[in-house]
Image (spheres, rainbow, N blue to C red):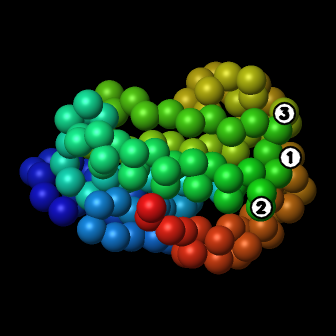
Amino acid sequence: MTGVACELCAQEGGEVMYQDASLRVVLVDDANYPGFCRVILQDHVAEMTELSPLMRQVMMNVVWQVELAVRDIMRPDKINLAAFGNMVPHLHWHVIPRYRDDLHFPAPVWGQEQREVDAQAIAARRALLPQLRARLQNLQNA
C-alpha cells in the first residue's frame, strides 16, 4: 500500500477479513453498527472510472458478496452502500447494515441521531459477528 497522508494506505481501515493483491474487506469496529464492512482497493485510486473495466467488475463483485453476507448473517432491514471519498479520497465502499431501530435510521449513519441505542439489540447483533467473520473470510474474488 502506498500513498502519503492517506489513511487507507497507511492503515488497514478495520479488521481484515479477506485480502488479495487487488483489494481487502474489513470489518469496521463501530459500536452502533455491528457488521459494518468496507471493501477497500489496495492501490491509491480515487474514482471508479480510474479503474479498468475488469477491475471495476472485480471490485463490485466483492461488494455484492459482502452485501449478501451481511444480509444473510445480520438480517438488517436495509443495506446502505456508499462510496464517497470526500474525506479519504482512496476508493472504498461502505456496506452498512441498517435497522429501523438503529441510532440514525432513516437518516445516514453520518447524519443526525434519531433515537437512543437499544443495548440489547446491539448485543444481539454483535453476537452474530463470529458468523459474519467466518463468511467474509471465505469470499471469492471472481
Closer to the camera, 11 or 132? 132
Quarter containing the C terminus = bottom left
- Callout 2 environment at 10 Å: few (<14), some (14 to 19), or many (20+)? some
Residue located beneath label 3 in the image = 100
Q: Is 80 placed above or below 59 here? A: above
Residue 120 x, y percent position in the rendering: 89, 56
Tag 2 residue = 73
Q: Nearest the camera: 3 or 21?
A: 21
What is the three-letter code of the residue carrying label 3? Arg
Q: CA distance from mark 2 to mark 1?
A: 19 Å
Q: Quadrant of residue 134?
A: bottom right
Q: Which residue is mark 1?
A: 118
Q: How many marks overall?
A: 3
**Residue 69 in the image, given as x and y percentages of width and height:** 68, 59
Q: In the rendered view, does 25 fall on the left or right side of 50?
A: right
Q: Hey, which residue is sitting farthest right in the picture?
A: 120
- Residue 10 location, quadrant: bottom left
Q: Would residue 111 be found to the left or right of residue 83 on screen? A: right
